[in-house]
Image: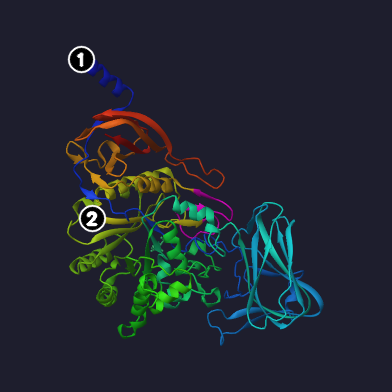
């Protein structure tokens, strides 16, 4: 009778299209400790991630220092008014970092103005929220009064206020005024009116919302930082990406130019201004308002280990491919050593003191440092060795991250990989932008890696829905699930892979140069992609110990279109199973526990949809998001049926 029932059950399962399977999990056999850094973030100012994005400044070209100083500005009431009234002055001899300013010269009780249209599709204002307008100016001839207006996209006045510049401000001086719109608006603009008779030098006009992250003046967009905090990242890699290298060395990222007073932060043109032929963004400048101090602070705020990447004396090898001669490399190495002192040095050191002066006497606890972004070849190997020897001699405790170029298993990669393994490098950075199929097929990539060799940082990866580098790539469920397959392989190999981060992180919906990206935003709102939810589900359920989850003694890595891994969280006494079903059929699974017993209840989080093309958007931000329910899990077995095209996280309380 029992056999007959089992047979009928089997027929019913086959008839319904279900496939039922048993997985074995041994919760007491730790395969690897989960590194606290396993799931982290890659932050680069690409796609307007910083300027025009998370850095909450609303005025584009606030200091008139863009190559075209009137970029994003126009004069009011007439464009002709510029001559003789507005003049851009260049003071490069006195301040090379911030050379240009606008001189306003009013002789006959004139009334003129400057309009700024903000980044991309214009300024967004929230009804009732105070905004801080700051004017940095100096008096040449006192007598000019300032009025400030905020406009909606259809030219409705939303707010007005006034400012009387200090007559005694003969040197550069900043003055702030608060202004509050009476309505919410998008595509808005700022008008600053100058009236009276006199001459005023205006170096910066800045506008920030008051509701920044942690209410810091001149800070970051709280909604976007919150999305990062919600990922509970193990590390924050910054500032990139290609911007570390620059298309030419002159445009490389120089951290010392990004700290301290804004007027000392020398702006450079972003490599992303013109690097992507189909998405030219000629007005993409890096203001460094979000500079290295703020990056360290951000990492600390969101509980992530800071991971700066520094230039190795080479510009982007896809662009100018400049290299610094070996005998001129010293300042670059010094920058690396000084950065460690800036982050960790006591306040009696030169750079530790600087950090304290900026507001953070306690060290930032830097433990990781990347030397070079996507560099490769003998010239990189040669320079890297010089950096490594010097850094290790002074700071042996800092773990160094070394690059292997831009892709996997090509000569560029294999050359660097063998050099770095021979050198016993600390951590090797690998990058993967590939098809969803590649991510599924390569979930076993790290199974065969040398367990005693360098650790791996999967520093950039993202599945490409169209093709690699295509402007048609989208963040849909298929790409997210394929990344989840790959991530089960990372988790299973957490004894080798120390860190992993999706890339890029942010993109403005109109200002982007690269796709896909983890989080998309416009000037007022943002949305999570399915890929974000996959990252979040891994990160929030990272556990403490990787344990074996097998089918017939083998890891679950594509059999029956499923990928799975398991961790135990010794703090919460939970077993966490992660399973991807990449097929259009439901998959019934029974997890059999050895050495332990389920305590009665489990939560089951699932990201699923019958259509793998489903996406979120600004107007439909919740088209697809995870769903949580509670299931019963008693004794030695936990059963569930994974929906077609789903990523499932099952959290089982253990006795
Ligand atoms: O993530 C976008 C770019 O891809 C990064 O800047 C670079 O490192 C990689 O080529």
Q: Is residue 602 magenta?
A: no
Seen in the image, is 119 located left or right of residue 288?
Answer: right
Q: Quadrant of residue 76?
A: bottom right
Q: What is the x, y in percent for residue 437?
A: 32, 47
Marking on residue 2: 1
Gap in angstroms between the C-alphas marked 1 and 2: 47 Å
Disc 2 residue crowd, few under 14, some 14–19, many 20+, Cα 10 Å:
many
Quadrant housing the N terminus: top left
Q: Is residue 476 above or below residue 290?
A: above
- Predominant SS along the magenta part: loop
Q: Give the residues drawn in magenta, as a range.
A: 508-527
Decide if residue 248 is in sight here. no
Residue shown at 74%/79% (left/top)? 85
Which residue is under mark 2?
A: 496
Query: Regarding mark 1 in the picture, which secondary structure is present there?
Result: helix
Q: What is the x, y in percent for residue 292?
A: 44, 69
């Amino acid at each position: 009778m029992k056999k007959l029932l089992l047979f009928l059950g089997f027929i019913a399962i086959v008839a319904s299209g279900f496939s039922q399977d048993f997985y074995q999990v041994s919760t007491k056999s730790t395969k690897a400790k989960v590194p606290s850094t396993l799931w982290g973030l890659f932050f680069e100012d690409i796609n307007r991630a910083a300027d025009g994005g998370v850095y909450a400044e609303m005025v584009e070209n606030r200091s008139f220092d863009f190559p075209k100083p009137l970029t994003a500005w126009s004069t009011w009431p007439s464009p002709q008014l510029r001559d003789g009234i507005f003049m851009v002055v260049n003071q490069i001899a006195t301040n090379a970092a911030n050379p240009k300013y606008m001189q306003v010269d009013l002789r006959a009780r004139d009334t003129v103005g400057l309009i700024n249209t903000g980044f991309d599709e214009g300024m967004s204002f929230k009804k009732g929220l105070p905004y801080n307008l700051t004017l940095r100016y100096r008096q040449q001839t006192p007598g000019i009064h300032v009025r400030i207006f905020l406009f909606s996209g259809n030219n409705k006045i939303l707010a007005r206020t006034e400012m009387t510049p200090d007559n005694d401000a003969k040197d550069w001086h900043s003055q702030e005024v608060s202004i509050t719109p009476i309505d919410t608006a998008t595509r808005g603009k700022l008008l600053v009116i100058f009236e009276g008779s006199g001459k005023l030098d205006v170096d910066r006009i800045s506008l920030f919302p008051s509701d920044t992250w942690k209410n810091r003046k001149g800070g970051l967009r709280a909604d976007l930082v919150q999305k990062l905090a919600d990922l509970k990242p193990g590390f924050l890699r910054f500032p990139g990406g290609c911007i570390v290298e620059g298309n030419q060395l002159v445009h490389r990222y120089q951290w010392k130019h990004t700290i301290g007073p804004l007027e000392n932060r020398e702006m450079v043109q972003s490599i992303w201004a013109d690097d992507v032929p189909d998405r030219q963004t000629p007005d993409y400048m890096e203001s460094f308002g979000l500079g290295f101090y703020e990056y360290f602070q951000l990492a600390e705020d969101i509980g992530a280990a800071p991971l700066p990447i520094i230039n190795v004396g080479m510009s982007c090898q896809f662009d100018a491919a400049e290299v610094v001669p070996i005998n001129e490399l010293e300042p670059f190495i010094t920058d690396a050593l000084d950065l460690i002192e800036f982050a960790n040095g006591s306040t009696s050191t030169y750079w530790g003191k600087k950090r304290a002066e900026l507001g953070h006497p306690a060290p930032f606890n830097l433990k990781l440092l990347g030397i070079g972004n996507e560099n490769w070849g003998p010239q990189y190997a040669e320079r890297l060795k010089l950096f490594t020897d010097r850094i290790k001699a002074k700071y042996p405790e800092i773990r160094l991250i070394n690059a292997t170029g831009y892709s996997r298993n090509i000569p560029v990669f294999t050359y660097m990989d063998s050099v770095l393994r021979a050198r016993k490098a600390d951590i090797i950075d690998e990058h993967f932008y590939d098809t969803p199929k590649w991510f599924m097929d390569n979930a076993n990539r790290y199974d065969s890696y040398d367990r005693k060799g360098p650790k791996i940082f999967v520093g950039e990866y993202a599945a490409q829905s169209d093709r690699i580098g295509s402007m048609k790539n989208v963040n849909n469920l298929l790409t997210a699930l394929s990344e989840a397959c790959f991530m089960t392989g990372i988790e299973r190999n957490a004894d080798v892979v120390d860190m992993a981060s999706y890339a890029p992180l942010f993109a403005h919906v109109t200002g982007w140069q690269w796709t896909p990206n983890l989080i998309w935003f416009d000037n007022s709102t943002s949305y999570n992609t399915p890929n974000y939810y996959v990252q979040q589900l891994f990160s929030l359920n990272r556990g403490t110990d990787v344990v074996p989850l097998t089918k017939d003694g083998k890891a679950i890595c594509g059999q029956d279109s499923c990928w799975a891994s398991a961790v135990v969280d010794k703090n919460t006494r939970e077993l966490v199973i992660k399973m991807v079903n990449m097929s259009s059929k439901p998959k019934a699974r029974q997890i059999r526990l050895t050495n332990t017993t389920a305590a009665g209840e489990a939560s089951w989080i699932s990201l699923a949809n019958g259509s793998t093309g489903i996406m979120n958007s600004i107007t439909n931000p919740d088209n697809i998001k995870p769903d949580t329910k509670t299931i019963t899990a008693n004794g030695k077995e936990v059963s569930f049926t994974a929906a077609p095209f789903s990523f499932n996280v099952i959290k089982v309380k253990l006795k």
